[in-house]
Amino acid sequence: MKTCTATSPNAVRGFKLALLALGSSFILAGCAGNPPTEQYALAQSAVNDAVSNGGVEFAPVETKSAQDKFHQADIAMHDENYDKARMLAEQAEWDARVATRKAQAAKAQKAVQDAHQGVQDLREEGMRGAQ
């Protein structure tokens, strides 16, 4: 009966490569396993800002999209699907920012229209007083 106690260099090299691959997969899995808490908080804040700035009234489509995506991100966080949660939270944040800007622009435009109407009313009043 023959027993081989010496290992070939190729076997040792293969074993090292297998350990390296296994270690790399654990490292990558560890990176993917971190919850995107900062991005989640940013998205939540942006959605809240959109709602409080009149997004529901002035940018309903964008606000609803942001709320829906944030809700989906919340579900993904709960399911520990962190890559999906991060992606959805980013999308929700940007949709909410668009809704906020659109609402702010609509409010500013309404203020300008109100100011023009006020000037017109003053002119008409001035014209009546001059007659």
Image (cartoon, rainbow, N blue to C red):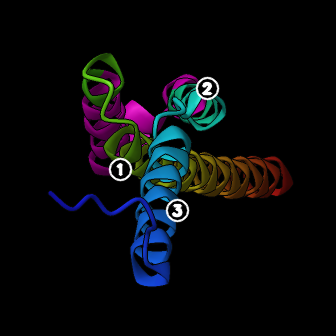
Which label sits in the foreground, 2 or 3? Answer: 3
- Crowd rating for badge 2 (residues with CA inside 10 Å; few <14, some 14–19, many 20+): few
The residue located at (40%, 37%) in the rendering is 82
Secondary structure found at label 1: helix
Foreground of the two, 28 or 93? 28
Furthest-front residue in view?
Answer: 1
Q: Nearer the viewer, residue 43 or 65?
A: 43
Nearer the N terminus, badge 2 or badge 3? 3
Q: Upstream in the sequence, badge 1 or badge 3?
A: 3
Report the span colored magenta: 48-74
Residue 70 spot, x, y in % from top left: 36, 32
Main secondary-structure element of the magenta-colored stretch:
helix
Residue on which the image places disc 3: 20
Residue where numbered disc 2 is placed:
41
Residue 14 place in picture, x, y as percent: 40, 73
In space, the residues marked 1 and 3 are separated at their CA atoms by 46 Å
| Mark 3 crowdedness (10 Å alpha carbons): few <14, some 14-19, many ≥20 | few
Secondary structure beneath disc 3? helix
Give me the C-alpha separation between circle 2 and circle 3.
36 Å
The one nearer the camera, 128 or 71, is: 71
Amino acid type indicated by mark 2 = Ala
